[in-house]
Amino acid sequence: MGSRARIVVFAPSEAVAVDAARLAFDEMDRLNLVLSDYTPASEAMRLCAAPIGAPHRVSPDLFDVVLKSARVHEASGGAFDPTLGALTGLWRESFRSGRLPDPQRLTDARARAGFRLIDVDERLSTIELLAPGVRFDFGAIGKGYAADAALQVLSRHGLRRAMVDLGGDLALGDAPPGEAGWRIEATDDRGGARALQLSNVGVATSGDAYRSVTIDGVQYSHILDPRTGVGLRSSSAVTVIASNAWLADALASAASVLGPEGEGGLRSEWPGAEIVWHARRAG
């Protein structure tokens, strides 16, 4: 998924820790081959290349991520959308070249994005593409989902005092020995930090501190607004603490698009999630 992974675990011996961590890394590798849009051979990318107008049975993991994505999509009024792959591909080119996407290519990519272009059959666990060129990008939920899965692997091997960090998305297990929780610093876009002690939750911070590009004097975030197909032009950071890392990951991305004034729907759907805003400056 284009991200580094790190595991911290407390175990009765180094051998136990190494064996369990290896299995947890294997699980993240497996899910990378299900969800990644960086890997043409992944299941998600093979689905995008499948014939349109016909239902395709997919793996339980891919189907689960699509269902979870659909729920966040609806609660966010469309601010969260993993069908933006054609658009994110264009913006990755812009990050490399330092030039804005060609307007016509941007228009074409927007036309190939949107949940309206896929049909999900929960009874048969199938997904049907309704138009050519639809491309998934699960970058705003996949890392959290894989971190959760890796933490579950460690737990099944009796290692509940563990933390999985996948690209900054955290899945936290039981607290380290003698601690109230895992010590986490939520860093905002201006270098400020909020110290947290947490356990058995997921944590994600979304912002443009490290992933943005400035073109013609305007800063564009890697987070795209589905309504425009353009990277966000406001400097912001939001940290979400939720029951799972996948949820924290998805809500952080959705909240970034909606802003503090628009994330009420997310709070209503997931009242147990904590959404913490850091410095925000219009760009």
Image (cartoon, rainbow, N blue to C red):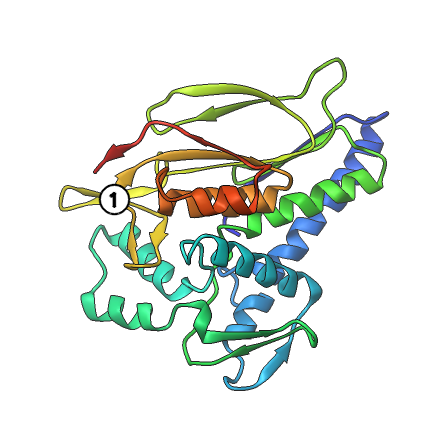
Q: How many marks?
A: 1
How crowded is the residue under tag 1: few (<14 C-alpha within 10 Å), some, or many (20+)? many
Residue sitting at x 33%, y 35%: 236
Above or below, 96 against 202 in this view is below
- The answer to which quarter of the image holds residue 199 is top right
Element on which disc 1 rests: loop
Seen in the image, is 138 located left or right of residue 31?
left
Q: Does the image show residue 3?
A: no
Residue positioned most to the left:
216
Q: Position of residue 206 (x, y in %)?
A: 43, 39
Seen in the image, is 150 located left or right of residue 231?
right
What's the amino acid at mark 1? Answer: Arg
Above or below, 26 against 121 in this view is above
Residue sitting at x 76%, y 28%: 161
Is 258 or 18 nearer to us in this picture?
Answer: 258
Above or below, 132 against 82 in this view is below
**Residue with the mark numbered 1:** 233
Q: Position of residue 202 (x, y in %)?
A: 61, 37
- The answer to which quarter of the image holds residue 19 is top right
Q: Position of residue 113 (x, y in %)?
A: 39, 68
Q: Quadrant of the C terminus?
A: top left
